[in-house]
Each structure stands twice: as structure tokens, then as C-alpha cells.
Amino acid sequence: KEYAASCIVRQNEIVAMTACPSSASQLNYIHCEQEAITRWLENFVEALERRRCTELGAGRDASRFTLDGQLCFDFMVLVEDGVKVAYPIECNPRLHTQCSVYNAEDAREALGGLLLAEPRTEGQTMRKLKKELAGYLERDYENTTKNVYWFYNEFFKLMPNSWLLSYEGEDDDGDYDVADNISTLKLLWTALLYLPAFATAITVALPVWTLLILTTGIQGGLPSQKLILDFLRRLAVPSEHVEGDYWRRDPTPFVAKNHVQIASRLLATLRTGVEWKKIDFAIGKVVEVGGD
């Protein structure tokens, strides 16, 4: 089984780490503990630290064996002789959008403290932040269905497939399923609350859908009942289903990325004539054919 992992390392010590089931288009995140991945990462940084100490003891420059920054990995976790073993298949020296699992106010503050801390910050301070952040993850994700999603990624799943839009594959979100323990009455109230917005969106897009129907028609029929209910469930319980960009204190990033950045990238793609295959709503990117 494949997993994605993201970690922050300070002076060869892991101070933050999260893992989640991986998928072809990583646009839904739910934190999970994977001991095999944690064990591999700890062994990795411990080996670096031993090498660093060896180089220092020999009077040589040890900076190339000192890791200080953010890393994201892809792992395959296999069961061998009854024991889970993690095998790394990709590593990138950057922060992953998976950091969006730290979405509670106190978790954000602790994460910011770890990211902005100077390399020589006292070990006691770093350990305090590390312990706090691990506690927040356990509080927020243990025995819950809390997850992170992107609104427009889920919204476009409701659009019928055509030559213009095509949401490919039902397994793009990995093994994640939306919990169905929300009352029908709450879903009904949620649908009524958002009805004006939905009606406006449909009215604005009506010319486009008319063109699609008159040219090649709708492929695959209308969205399934499950897709519609999953979308409403996400809207009905925002404490469990967290939109990756939206923050009630400052909705500017949500508006700017979805309505300015992505729109400008699409216009640039149309202007240059570059062929593209999908929109990544997590990072606000238009993915080109042959691109990553």
C-alpha cells in the first residue's frame, strides 16, 4: 500500500511528521500513524547524525551530513513475515500540501514555530513544540473522520463528463470515504442553505452546458447519489471536513487562488496553446501534458 509522508527536520532530528494514504491525484488528506514509516525516517536521520559526528571527530566538514528543512516522501508499505516494512520510492526537498492537516489554530501556531525556528534554537524549545504538535495531531485525528479537501475539486466531481470536463477515475482519492453518519435533516438544511449559490452557478454556466449538450452531449450521465451526498456532507460538518484554503478569519487565499490564480493560469495556457490535462486545486496549478 502506498503512503505519502511529510516531515520537518531540524539538525538531524524529526520535529514533525505526518503520513496519509496516497493516490494518483493527492487532493484529500487524512492523517494516520504508520509505525513502519516513522521507524524508517528515524533510522534515516539517526544514520545522518552518526555520520556527522564521525566527520566532526575526524576534523572534516560535516555540513553535508546535517539535514535542516522540510522533506516529503512516497512510501510503499509491505507486510513481510507479519511485519510492516516501509520502502521509500520518492523524496522531494520541499514542504508538502499535506501540511494542511495542521489546520487547528493551536496546531498552526506550533507548526509555524517549527518552520520559522532558527537552526540553533534551544533543543528544549524545539522538543516542546514537537510534543505539542504531535499531541494536536493525536487529538484531531485519532478516532475521528476529520480530513482535508479542496472545495472546487469536489464541486467539479458533480459535473457530467464531456469533451470539456472529465473527472477520471473513482480512485483518485485513495481509500478515503466520507462518513455517512450525518442526519438527513442536517443534509437537507445544508442543501437549502447553499441553494442560492448553486442556482447562481448553474445559471452562469448554463450557456456552456447548452453548448456541450448541442455538440457532443453528456457522457456517463448525471452524478451519482453518492457524489452528491458526499459533497453535502462535507459542507454540513466543516469541523470534520476542512477546506484546505478557507480560513474564516481571512478568506482571501481561498478566493484569490480559486478565482484569480487558477483562472489566470488557464488563460495563459489557452494563450500559449499548451495542451493541459487537469487542474490541481491544492496548489493552484494547471498541469500540462507531460508535466508533473
Image (cartoon, rainbow, N blue to C red):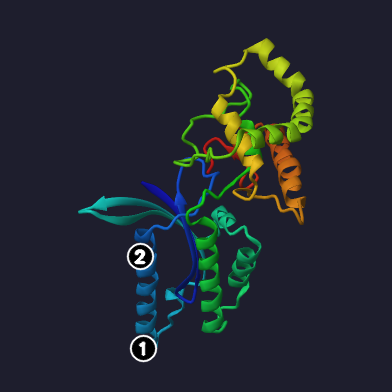
Asked if 63 appears above or below 108 in the picture, the reply is below
Could you say where residue 110 lies in the image, as x and y percent from the top left? 60, 69
Could you say where residue 167 lies in the image, as x and y percent from the top left? 56, 29
Comparing marks 2 and 1, which lies closer to the viewer? 2
Asked if 39 appears above or below 64 in the picture, the reply is above
Q: Please, what is the three-letter code of the amino acid marked with disc 2?
A: Arg
Numbered circle sitting on residue 101: none
Instruction: Depth check: give the residue in front, 205 or 151.
Output: 151
Residue at image point 35% right, 73% down? 47
Could you say where residue 40 lies in the image, as x and y percent from the top left? 35, 63
The residue pinned by badge 2 equals 39
**143 left or right of 183 in image:** left
**26 left or right of 165 in image:** left
Corner quadrant of residue 264: top right
Could you say where residue 271 lies in the image, as x and y percent from the top left? 72, 33
Instruction: Depth check: give the residue in front, 282 or 285.
Output: 282
Corner quadrant of residue 115: bottom right
The residue pinned by badge 1 equals 57
Residue at image point 49% right, 54% down? 31
Residue at image point 63% right, 32% down? 156
| C-alpha gap between disc 2 and disc 1 | 27 Å
Within 10 angstroms of label 1, few (less than 14), some, or many (20 or more) residues?
Answer: few
Residue 191 visible in the shown view? yes
